[in-house]
Amino acid sequence: MNKYKLLNESLKAIKERIINLLILRGEPGFGKTFTTLKYCRENEIKHKYINTYTTPLSFYKLLYENRESEVLVFDDLSSISDPTIKAMLKAICEGEETKERVINYYSTSSILEKEGLPESFEFKPKVVLIFNQSPAGFESIINRGVEIEFNFTFKQKLLIFNHFQAEADISQVILDYLKTDCNASTQNLSIRSLVILSKLHQKGYDWELFAKEILKKDRDLCDLIEMNATTWCDTTGHHRATYYRRRKKNGLKDSRKVALVAPPATTLSPLSNVNKDLKGTKPYNKYKK
């Protein structure tokens, strides 16, 4: 579980103010938010979790009210569309360790005065950004912090589920189902979905009925996994080269096997067989009387 070890070490570095920005990106439902908030609680870090983004003014007020916190955790950044909110987020992420980060909000109206807000203020917290896909417009700040990607193979996911089984209360029967009925083409495969199925199982529901709906398979990818080249080509009408190219694109191993050619058997001539049979006997000499 090197990714989670790295996550905990990064959060420790955030707490000790060694790094300003931590970026967690990857598949949903694999404990990015859970692990981050758990670490903050267990280590008594003054933090604020933010996953709703409304108007620029309310966002500015939120930043101002939490300007003295140690850590601000921003989740689901892909839902941000307002350019003013994006600009404020960039401002709190782009500051260097030796420089203060100042947030500004200029308005021609008296709205700031009514809300009791200044036109600018110093922002002190470290920042954790969590998202599934990199949102447009944030490319320039990605390299300013530590980025951890949470994308896993099917085998790695099984190891992760076993690791979190006790903590997330995942039923063993659900894990057994994954090993027999799921593969790399299974969609929505996450700790979150397994927790839901486990609760259904524990309450006596027909959890397998739900599992077939929640854990659907990508049909095209499933065919690439389960069919050999000949069957796949006959079914789809594509060439073998397409089959192997698509397997490679999806991170599947090359299913072609190198044939081991046995060395040709030594063929003995009839004369050699005779000599073999006469081995150990005295040679016949027709001139000897």
Image (spheres, rainbow, N blue to C red):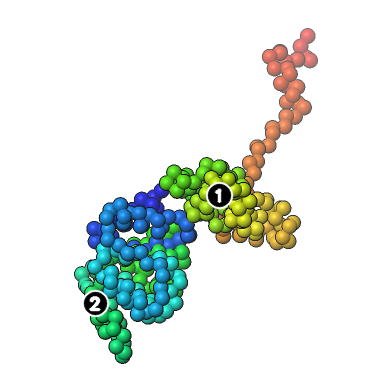
Q: Residue at x 41, y 76 (%)?
A: 54
> What is the secondary structure assignment of the residue under circle 2?
strand
Amino acid carrying label 1: it is: Leu
Q: Which residue occupies the foreground of this view, 187 or 268?
A: 187
> What is the secondary structure assignment of the residue under circle 1?
helix
Locate residue 124, reporting x and y percent: 24, 69
Residue 72 located left or right of residue 207: left
Q: Is residue 205 above or below residue 26?
A: above
* Residue lying furthest left: 98
Q: Which residue occupies the foreground of this view, 76 or 117?
A: 117
Amino acid carrying label 2: it is: Phe
Residue under numbered circle 2: 121
Residue under numbered circle 1: 200
Image-quadrant location for residue 7: bottom left
Locate residue 84, reporting x and y percent: 37, 80
Please state which of the two labelled residues, at mark 2 or mark 1, is closer to the viewer. Answer: 1
Locate residue 179, reporting x and y percent: 57, 44
Residue neighbourhood size for the residue with mark 1, other residues' Cα within 10 Å, grouped as few (<14), some (14–19), many (≥20): some
Locate residue 85, reporting x and y percent: 37, 77
Q: Is residue 52 above or below residue 15?
A: below
Q: Quadrant of the C terminus?
A: top right
